[in-house]
Image (spheres, helix red, strand yellow):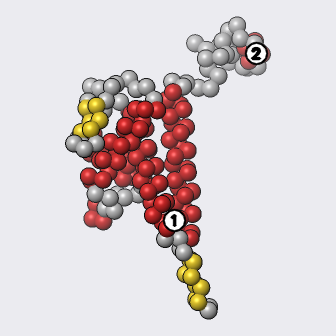
Amino acid sequence: MSWQGQISTIIRHLVNDIDSSTYKYTDKRIETTALVAAQLVTLEVDLGNTYTINVEQCALSPDPTETATRDNAFINLVSIKSACIILGSEVRTESSNAISIKDGPSAIDLRGVASTLIVLYKELCGKYDKMLLDYRAGNSIAGQAILGPYSPGSDYAGRNQGHSGQRGGYLH
């Protein structure tokens, strides 16, 4: 399966557009959104591979989903960024439709749709920001590079490790 199939499937799951009989977004829209997101991601982070992105031709080279050169970080960042772009578009669309009508005892209130989408948008984009920060930090555990055998506090961690026979506080 090429990048179009794999990344598009991930994006469809993130935006809950998975029923093929009633797709809200065409394959072309999902793919071009992925390429726009790929262009933005390459501006935000230095990746291991250099990608050639052509939105007009709907082309991405090299294919990040090929087994030999699979780039999971790129795939994940682009997929989540694409979902943020799509949900941002949905927020703008629904915000213009957010109306409240009252006529006597009857009422129609569509403001809740936009507010729910805004919550989803912020949550997903927050996850993207965290994933981007984690990637930039090398996916390391916070403090792992700081705590070593000669770091302040490492002797305290070693004393309080317990009696399991492990050398506590030291990273191997």
Up/down of 16 relative to 109, above or below? above
Density class for disc 2 (Cα within 10 Å; few <14, some 14-19, many ≥20) is few
C-alpha gap between disc 2 and disc 1: 52 Å
Badge count: 2
Q: How far across and down, in percent of the image, does residue 170 sit?
A: 65, 13
Quarter of the figure with the N terminus? top left
Q: Can you tell which quarter of the image residue 143 is in? A: top right
* Amino acid type assigned to the residue bearing label 1 in the image: Ser
Up/down of 131 relative to 156, above or below? below
The residue shown at (55%, 62%) is 116
* Amino acid type assigned to the residue bearing label 2 in the image: Gly
Q: How far across and down, in percent of the image, does residue 135 sit?
A: 49, 29
Which residue is labeled 1 in the image? Answer: 95
Density class for disc 1 (Cα within 10 Å; few <14, some 14-19, many ≥20) is some
Taking depth in this image into account, of 43 and 4 the one nearest to the observer is 43
Taking depth in this image into account, of 134 and 58 the one nearest to the observer is 58
Which residue is labeled 2 in the image? Answer: 153
Q: Can you tell which quarter of the image residue 79 is in? A: top left
Q: How far across and down, in percent of the image, does residue 126 sit?
A: 55, 44
The residue shown at (71%, 11%) is 151
Q: Is residue 83 left or right of residue 28?
A: right
